[in-house]
Image (cartoon, rainbow, N blue to C red):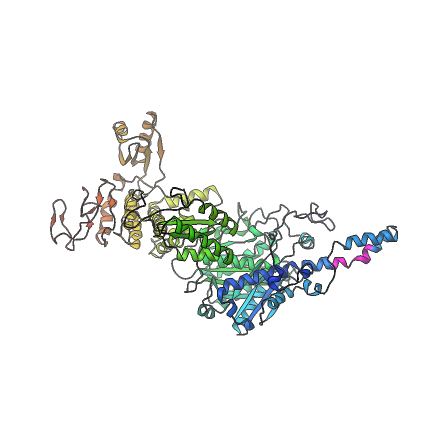
Amino acid sequence: MAGGGFLRPGPRGADKTYCRRGAFLPPATLDPLEFGIPPQALSATDTAQLLALIVAKETLDEACRTQFRDIDRSRTSIVLGVASATELVGTMGARLQRPVWVKALREAGLPEEEVTAICDRISSHYVEWQESSFPGVLGNVVAGRIANRLDLGGTNCVVDAACASSLSALLMAMNELELGHSDMVISGGVDALNDIFMYMCFSKTPALSKSGDCRPFSDASDGTIVGEGLGLFALRRLEDAERDGNRIYAVIRGIGSSSDGRATSVYAPRPEGQAVALRRAYADAGHDPRSVELVEAHGTGTRAGDLAEFTALTQVFREADAEAGAWCAIGSIKSQIGHTKAAAGSAGLLKAALALHQKVLPPTIKVERPDSRLNLESGPFYLNTRARPWVKADGPRRASVSSFGFGGSNYHVALEEYTGPRAASRLWAGGALLLVGGADARSLADAARTLGARVEKEGLEAVARDSQIAFDPRSRHRLAIVAADARQFEARLATALTQTGNFNAPGIHLAVGEGGDKGGGGKVAFLFPGQGSQYVSMGADLAVAFDEARAVWDGQAALPAMPGQPPLHRVVFPPPAFTREEVEAQEASLTRMIHAQPAIGTASLALLAVLERAGIRADAVAGHSFGEITALCAAGVLDRNTALSLAAERARCMEEAAAGSDGAMIAVAAGRERVEPLLQGLDVVLANDNGPEQVVLSGARAAIDGAATRLEAEGLRVVRLKVASAFHSPVVAQAAETFRTVLDGTAFGSFAIPVYANLTAATLWRRRGPRPAGRADRRHGPLPRDGRDALCRRCPHLRGGRGRVRC
């Protein structure tokens, strides 16, 4: 926060700033002896040098793990983007202003002894010049100290391209690798300069936000917020990283750079210059922007800067596809951490790489309405303001990162997800998830303590990743801890260890025995929902957090799409809406049968996949109406792709049957015996007898409205359902015939567990052995010759086995 007498409203005050907010790094702990730094030299060493040294060591540890000691350090380089000025330059230079102080005090008429005393007091607030001051203030020693302390023998330098410094360093690092001069390069950006000097620079441009918030691409954007930070990356040639077993998070496919050339001013952004860098990046990558679904923009929150960048991006992306609607998410991490200047490109690169790795489209915050000048309605981009699962049917996910600097420096990087054998294990997106199991409470506690000891030595994320890989969901006793950091993990582990002897402790462990023994508990049943349960973004948090859930959506996206319909995941997880009309349109689109039924089926199977990964399996299943399809899949009768295809076909048949009709449904909070006598003379159907206290009525909208009025007059609570038609009524009866044609060509497997039928509550099950071929069913004709369960030829129910349904 700006203070110390420097704050004044408006950009006009001499030596004043009008912004009182900023983004600052939290305190960090450094053991100088660990890096061989004399403790007395710390005060004369710039913070950026020390922080970069800590992070460089962490970067190499993460990249190489136990192989760090074995790497060829003579071919390991360090190339960083660092601003020319460091924090210590300003303070050390200020100490040298003593002649100015003396002159001013003498001119004020103070006696010489007071002049000397006052100047001595001012000097005492600054670090004295010493032997280590010279290297301590130099920007290039940010990289040099890393090379020196970690014994790296490759190229060692820094580059300064203002706010594009990180990606400028990245380009040089990639050249090192491509030319064969280095086998590994540590690259990125470092900026710990957030003092009044930097506030003054941005205030007088003026580029700082008057409201104190960085809102990229928002109609309320009024400037940026300066921040400090650093982000380093270990870069290798892909084949080398795969050979040596390094953890790989993303692949850089191309990078482009350009200069704005002649412009109105040296710091005014120029779309034409930025577009050149974009085109060069995609030419280098070998793919065009049409396959890019995420752009992490420079996005500073300044009105002129955001518009210029968006103009350049739109121009280049429209060259790839002028007809397609908005296909690419755009955002900026500066809405969350401010503008970290020389490290800004690193922040964007980190966000994009992790988005590819986690398969999540990340949000940009603080945007209530987009900037109307951006014309999002007809462009290739949409502004993503919430985390959404990144569903992809085929081909790799691709993202890009932009970074621009004062002086007309333009950089654009094309990234691609890595799906090879060395992909870094994906952490649960809600924090660090640590899993451990044991045969009994004591072994669980011992395993948990071992996990805690490893966290202290190896770090939370590394141990979390290993624990997820090693976790056996069949363990009788299991413990899961979610923690944001090591301190929170230690506290929650301590809580868990005090309760591992208590089998009934909530949220601590779940007992599941072998061979059907549930540790003394009852059996488990899954009930799958039917149409009407859909809502926009349903299952998004699950697909964001768990690969198993997202993979189901990926599989659904790979199935043949309905002609003329958008991809299903774009209906369920649509781009953020900013008006009530957009929200209602999205809800109406998902309510359509053609979308709702396959969406509900996919969301249900995604949840089922997560439960199965956790070792939670049902003893029996049932489905409410449409949910019978997903229940059959859960029971092993249908494979996942068949179930999803049947869901789409069922929806198509019902939508065709209901075309031209105006059907509706209501839920009534009363039992069948109470409701049926009140329906005399009304052309409505009791569609669902859900239980003693609820039925659902279906029919033409006018008839349903009349029924609702009558029932409410009797004091009954009536809820109008968000459905596309009158299900389980004559309105959609024709769908049974067309869907039966689909079912006749469907292969069904055997039941792994019982399925309870909607119509009768009887179980659908298979006999212990196959029936004699050709034996007749007295009601429905001959059974299939292979003795398998099959659909009844006269109605949409399974037949065969014990608990056979009545048709």
Question: Which sits in the foreground, 729 or 624?
Answer: 624
- Residue occupying image coordinates x 51% and y 58%: 457
Taking 14 as reference, is 169 above or below it? Answer: below
Instruction: Indicate left or right for 750 with 437 as reference.
Output: left
Does residue 293 appear anywhere in the picture?
A: no
Q: Quadrant of the C terminus?
A: top left
The overriding secondary structure of the stretch rendered in magenta is: helix
Does residue 433 appear anywhere in the picture?
A: yes
Please say whether residue 100 is one of the residues in the magenta stretch.
Answer: yes
Magenta-drawn segment: 93-101
Task: Give the percent coordinates (x, y) of residue 225.
Answer: 62, 51
- In the picture as drawn, the residue positioned furthest to the top comes out as 714
Task: Give the percent coordinates (x, y) of residue 358.
Answer: 45, 56
Taking 672 as reference, is 162 above or below it? Answer: below
Question: Which sits in the foreground, 761 or 325?
Answer: 761
Question: Which sits in the foreground, 235 or 41?
Answer: 41
